[in-house]
Image (tube, coloured by chain):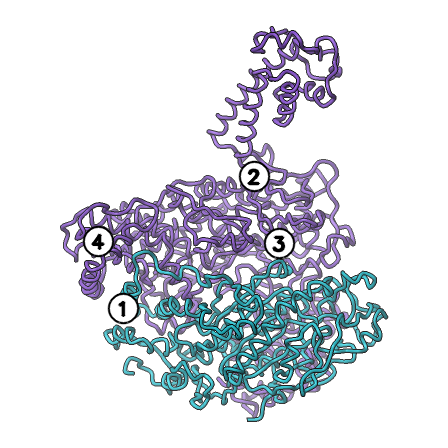
Amino acid sequence: MPQRNREQRQPVLSPSMCRVFLSGWLIVSASLAMACELLAAEGEFSSKSINFSKDVLPILSDNCFHCHGPDSQSRQAELRLDQPNPALDQILRESAPGQSVFWERVSTTDPDLIMPPPETKHRLTAAQLLLLQRWLQAGAPWGKHWAFEPIIKPAVPESDRAENPIDAFVIAQLHQVGKELSPQADSARLLRRLALDLTGLPPSLELRQKYLKSSNQPLDAGAVVDELLASPHYGERMAWEWLEAARYADTNGYQGDAERTMWPWRDWVVEAFNQNLSFADFTRAQLAGDLLSQATDRQKLATAFLRNHMINGEGGRIAAENRIDYVMDMTETTGTVWLGLTMNCCRCHDHKFDPIRQQDYYQLSGFFNNTPVDGSGGNPQTPPVLEWPSEEQKEHRNRLLKERQEIAEKVLAWEDEFVPLKHLAPAEGPALSTQPVSAIEVFDDANGVATSPWHQDDGLPAEVRAIRQKPPQDRKASELTQLINFWNQWQGQSPQSLLMLKSRIDELDALQRSIPQVMVMQERAGEPRKNFILSKGLYNQPQAEVPTDVPLFLKSKKASERFRDQNVSPVLTRRELSEWLLHDENPLVARVVVNRIWQQFFGIGLVKTSEDFGIQGEKPSHPELLDWLAADFREHGWDIKRLVKQMVTSRTYCQTTLVPREAYVDDPENRLLARGPRYRWPAWMLRDQALAVSGLLVPKTGGPPVKPYQPEGLWEEATFGAKRYQADQGDSLYRRSLYTFWRRIIAPPMFFDTANRQTCIVRTSRTNTPLQALALWNDPVYLEAARVLATRFFVNDRKLHDDERLRRLFEHILVREPTPQELELLRTSIMSWRDRLVQSPEQVNDLLAVGASPASLAGEDSASRAEAALWTVVTMILFNLDETVSKE
Amino acid sequence: MHLFKESSTSTKRNPTGNPPLPPVPPCEWMTTHHRRSFLGTAAGSLGLGLASLSHLLAAEQSPAPISSTSTAATTDIVGRPRLPPRARHVIYLFQNGAPTHVDLFDYKPKLRELHGQPLPESYVGGKRFSTMTGNANGKLILGNVEPFAQHGESGAWVSSLMPHTAQIADELCFIKSMHTEAVNHAPAITFMLTGSELPGRPALGAWLTYGLGSAADNLPGYVVLTSVTKGTSCGQIFYDFYWGSGFLPSRFQGVKFRGSKDPVLYLKDGPGISREFREAMLNDVTALNLQKQALSGDPEISTRIAQSEMAFRMQTSVPELTDLSGESKATLEMYGPQVEQPGSFAYNCLMARRLVERGVRSVQLMHAGWDQHNSLTTELYNQCRDTDQPSAALVKDLKQRGLLDDTLVIWGGEFGRTPFIQGDLANRPRWGRDHHPYAFTVWMAGGGVKSGVTHGASDDLGMNVLENPVHVHDLQATILHLMGIDHERLTYRFQGRQFRLTDVHGHVVHDILKHV
């Protein structure tokens, strides 16, 4: 369609012209394009009544709100068009038939009068004018932006072919454009799709045997899904996107990028998904676990969600500024994750498009503003922290504490014997042992004791005396060193018990350092910190004080009353915040959450802009389906596994992706859902898939992060040599991607298209670049997985016919059998590879030795080795097929 | 040619309103005969819609004589009439952080005259500044920190901070009447590079590759090089949407080379995989993927095939690209002392020339550190030291090699800096200037732009545009025009609307075009 040029566009649509258009649909002059636009607009809308939120609000928002919107600072002529008000009423009201001030101003051709003014470079199209005209004719009914309207569960469209309500909605919409759902995908492909989607791993052999036995029956998706949802790997898979949203990483970010120990929280997330914690409890724990009545340690641990933000430890940073940064990060993360709103622009001013006032931003930030964190320093374990020892660490510590106590008593006895500290101790000081111990028991050299001066005269240096006044078990390692030095100097040696005490305390200290300290939330003692609107978001420019509260435009009367009833304290806390989020009247949370889970399985949300449900966000492709899912999710106790099952057992999800090119061209993003989801799996899943099929995967869950293979020098380059990457050895090389150490300033390079884990990201790009091809070819993990898998298939049955081995290997990786054409092509290929490899013994050696696991077929004859290398190459080829890397 | 079912003249629109997407820039397919061999076996299974194949092959296949425009295509890859191109390559030297126009190129003697005096209110007029300035009324005027002098036959005024750029003044076209809409870095950079303040639209380079195809056989059509700045980046991040493909298919996005001795990770094949092995493996993978394509219409399959082919070629082209052993001592010296440090601006400028020589359509350098809020007398000098010599060397080098006529070089940032001070006038070491969208300077060279000229002017304080304003969309329209594209016709239908780089705006700045 040719674009109109500027000259042609000039005479937009005068009122008179418009009337001509409207009355007889005579296409006067203008351009063909304009006519088409008008016809399209008419075709689309004439049969329906005008929908304010869908049809009118976007026009007003795009063209008017900048100067006549929520932002009071930039508002012109004291007129706002974002909410009903008397001034607006006046201009909308008609002075003569078809004549309102509003219509005159938007439809005139007079450059001095026309709205939006020419200098804004905004211009209403003919179709938009038509919509406005129809809206005015209907009496200019007002409404809210769709996402701010309460969620009302719509009726499921009548359908005799849809058991699952999702399908009923999708089919109804497809019928409007004369389309149908595609058939179900074949069982093998569907099983693979489900297994990777729900566990991030290919289907186990057991699942394949159980469900792919009969090729005639369609896959029993419900039964498969139940098994997958029960797998411990389900939680690992679901955790990935949550970790991205939670900006989870193993370092602080910024210069220095100090290492932190937040991973017990990561394990909490995995567990929560596996145990199917309701999304309500999931929310309560992470936003307010510390404030729940009789909060458990696990609930407190969950609040680390909020503390996953970056920490800036650069020298010269102003602590108060850092603190505000952290509070803002928590506010904005919460805004995006639960409300689907982009709040960050409200740091400085009222939102330009959404009804969020700057005041709302700072009221909301009040919930996060009352921790003891002061923003100083870059301690990656800045209190409040929760200690999270493992069972072994707990045992180890108990043993050491017991030993420390025993030795401390000996030390005390000795000290008691030789120095009359009792007299020196302050009245409230610790009670000291009154059991004198013979010097001989303590000192090897009894003679030394006899000459000790301390019985008679306390000539101790002040710091030594101070140390000795502390019970021995409470002394620090450095203090013990001081005592030991003192004794050594005086006596030439120290009492044995003191040395033993020092060694235990050193060991305890080391143990203590190795115990993860997870940064968690806690309200600070005393008066709550006051909240201020910060001018331009600057920490040192507080303006009006504001209470802690939720955004006004989302605050329903009922919710406010409930707050009042339930809350003894006049101050709202994170606990009330989480209850408000989960309240039936909150229009956003359920929509936002089901949309994100939809995005996880279909590749694109029903609302594509899953991070922005505001007026500038995209409208839902299936608004009623979204509302139905949201309402249903809430009604059923925010049950995530139930929701997931509902989605992935729908016919919509289970459709085939093997449809002709026209279907993809017609609807590139598959917004109509007339086919199954097809796109490249995330990079982390591809790595896990290779590890799993090769048998290299170490399926252990949880624990400290691991460091798998990574190209050399990346950390050094990014940190100017300050950090060196040392890959782990053994099992840690083969753990799931989820457990990979995440350095914020230089993320693991093999995970392309992932969130940067610096700020909250709920939607990542999906690209297709040559660099990705290279990573999948040459990351040692894939080479090693290929050789280990191939070796196994070769060694298991060396006599197997090529075709049979090929078929088995293919099926092992892709779950389905190869087609005759594929088999034929690979068969031919194998012949030439055999020739090549027999002639290249050195390359065979290299191929069979790649990676850290023991070399394959070491010491065997060259023919066997060449065969193993051959199958290694075949595996590499299969690993790089489009289908292997794609959800299909 | 029987492979491609649709004829080159087919411009029939599909229901989305877009031309059928060519899955692979055709030249990528046709250059290595190995590729052909398996393609032959797959003949007929390839229902690809390749528009304008013959034109592109005629125009773009031969990589060597870039300066020749005689074979210029008259139809672009999307099948639309093309203007005669004046340039075939763009090198955008993007100066992230906003260089201070009044200290570098836009000489305003009056600033020194009025140094320390309050800014007259008539210049401000309710303008919006960044959060740091707030209200500009009463701010104190700050004179240029270093003297200016006139250079070359054109007599262009250039600050002594930019001695090398001064030497090439007669090659340059200064636009001193640039203005933009955003006042913060990321939105303004996004605006400059994608035509929209919000992320998600295709970048200029993506539009160019979409519209013109790639002219490089062995390298991506759109390459991004970012400076690795040691402590001078002001903490600014280069977001990947600065070179994203937005709603265009993902193969049009810029490919970012890392600023290190290994510009591309995982480039080297693993142990035991020779070049021959890699090629044979790739052939097998591609043959199987082509079979898949017969079953599934997903265009990502053909993109993946093409990207793998490109990856294979990059395995040799990238090491060759970064091997500077063939560069003469004189050339290396021209770019300055940092030229052999991967990731330096100098290194990247040299890379830009080498990329263009190899046919790359769009090269985008990102260099941060121009955000002098309090460092006009400190960091600014480092910035100029790091960028002045390499930028000038690039223009000279291109000219010496006969590449400048075909290559448009653009130097500039996202906005300018305030003519008034940010900071304390008495504290010279902490002098600064704030963000300033109302007037700033970019320069262009080569590629069909007039040389030795200045277009447009700001007022006598460098505050507002006085004559011939050039909006960001105008600059974009002009760049597309020089590349042979009508900015109003290069569109992509998305979400029911035709999108273009210049939104619904933009006028070509005809005054700066060289007469043909």
Q: Nearer the observer, disc 4 or disc 3? A: 4
Q: Amino acid at mark 1?
A: Ala
State if disc 4 and disc 1 touch (CB < 8 Å): no
Q: Are marks 2 and 3 on the same chain?
A: yes
- Camera-side mark, 1 or 4: 1
- Secondary element under disc 3, as helix, strand or loop, is helix
- For marks 4 and 3, the one nearer the N-term is 3
Query: Regarding mark 4 in the picture, which secondary structure is present there?
Result: helix
**Are circles 3 and 1 on residues that touch, CB within 8 Å?**
no
Chain coloured purple: A
Q: Real-space Cα distance between discs 1 and 4?
A: 20 Å
Q: Position of residue B308 (x, y in %)?
A: 36, 67
Q: Which mark is residue B287?
A: 1
In the rendered structure, the answer to whether residue B179 lies left or right of residue B256 reads right
User: Which residue position is annotated with label 3?
Assistant: A332
- The CA distance from mark 4 to mark 2 is 47 Å
Chain for mark 1? Answer: B
What residue sits right under mark 4 in the picture?
Answer: A808
Q: Are marks 4 and 3 on the same chain?
A: yes
Three-letter residue code for mark 2:
Val
Which disc, if any, is residue B130? none
